[in-house]
Image (cartoon, coloured by chain):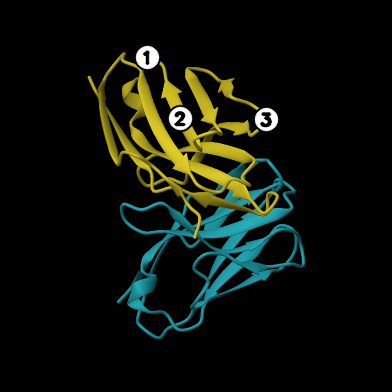
Amino acid sequence: NAGVTQTPKFQVLKTGQSMTLQCAQDMNHNSMYWYRQDPGMGLRLIYYSASEGTTDKGEVPNGYNVSRLNKREFSLRLESAAPSQTSVYFCASGQGLNTEAFFGQGTRLTVV
Amino acid sequence: GESVGLHLPTLSVQEGDNSIINCAYSNSASDYFIWYKQESGKGPQFIIDIRSNMDKRQGQRVTVLLNKTVKHLSLQIAATQPGDSAVYFCAENIDRGSRLTFGEGTQLTVNP
């Protein structure tokens, strides 16, 4: 049982490049989330998917797009990376209402 | 906007002492709260949760207290151990479970 798996673990991009962060969960969870965490700060919600087929903006959605490919997979895309998007990105999944979310190990992204 | 915040950014305790980490929240509609532990280089891990119809919940060496009157949440760790050194986040579940909002975190350091 792998839980929540994120790929890649590390990535360096040049300004303007695009990339997709992949996330998959094997717990049959309905809800999936993407967060970013900047140094010394908490996690800020970028996008979430309450169920397969739906996605909604979180606190900081600008510069990102998401796709809930199926119940297992939820990807995050940066169309034109900017230095301000240098951060650690966490994917999480959960059953939603009044249940905890389980987190992946994170993707450390640096935009130069 | 409404957010979850923490009173203290750092907390240093001696091994064997009890630790108390505090959290203030401002969304009176929140009905579910979670404490997470995040070790360096890892994703957040679930510690304990509490629903708004409860005042107290106990786990193994941890207790969460909820005071809805003053919108305050605390995490108590008994007999703190070096392995408890980490950043602790509280999170509140809003929009009927569709997303979690995190506070800024408290860095707990346990001195031998």
Q: In what element is the residue under mark 2?
A: strand
**Horizontal and vertical percent position of residue A101:** 61, 45
- Which residue position is annotated with label 1? B79
Picture layout, residue A61 above or below residue A92: below
Amino acid type assigned to the residue bearing label 3 in the image: Asn
Sequence-first tag of 2 and 1: 2
Quadrant position of the N terminus of chain A in the picture:
top right
Amino acid type assigned to the residue bearing label 1 in the image: Ala
Please name which of the two marks, 3 or 2, marks the residue nearer to the observer. Answer: 3
Q: In what element is the residue under mark 3?
A: loop
Residue drawn at (58%, 22%) of the image: B57
Picture layout, residue B110 above or below residue B89: above
Q: Residue B20 or B72: which is nearer the viewer?
A: B72
Sequence-first tag of 3 and 1: 3
Identify the mark at residue B74; answer none if there is no mark.
2
Picture layout, residue A106 above or below residue B9: below
The chain to which mark 3 is attached is B
Picture layout, residue B82 above or below residue B24: above
**Horizontal and vertical percent position of residue A67:** 66, 71
Q: Colour of chain B?
A: yellow
**Horizontal and vertical percent position of residue A5:** 57, 53
For the residue carrying disc 1, how many other residues have a C-alpha within 10 Å: few (<14), some (14-19), or many (20+)?
Answer: some
Q: In what element is the residue under mark 1?
A: loop
- Which residue position is annotated with label 3? B53
The span from disc 2 to disc 1 (Cα, nearest Å) is: 16 Å
The chain to which mark 2 is attached is B
Query: Is A81 on the left-hand or right-hand side of A68?
Result: left
The span from disc 3 to disc 2 (Cα, nearest Å) is: 16 Å
Q: Colour of chain A?
A: cyan
Query: Is A72 on the left-hand or right-hand side of B7?
Result: right
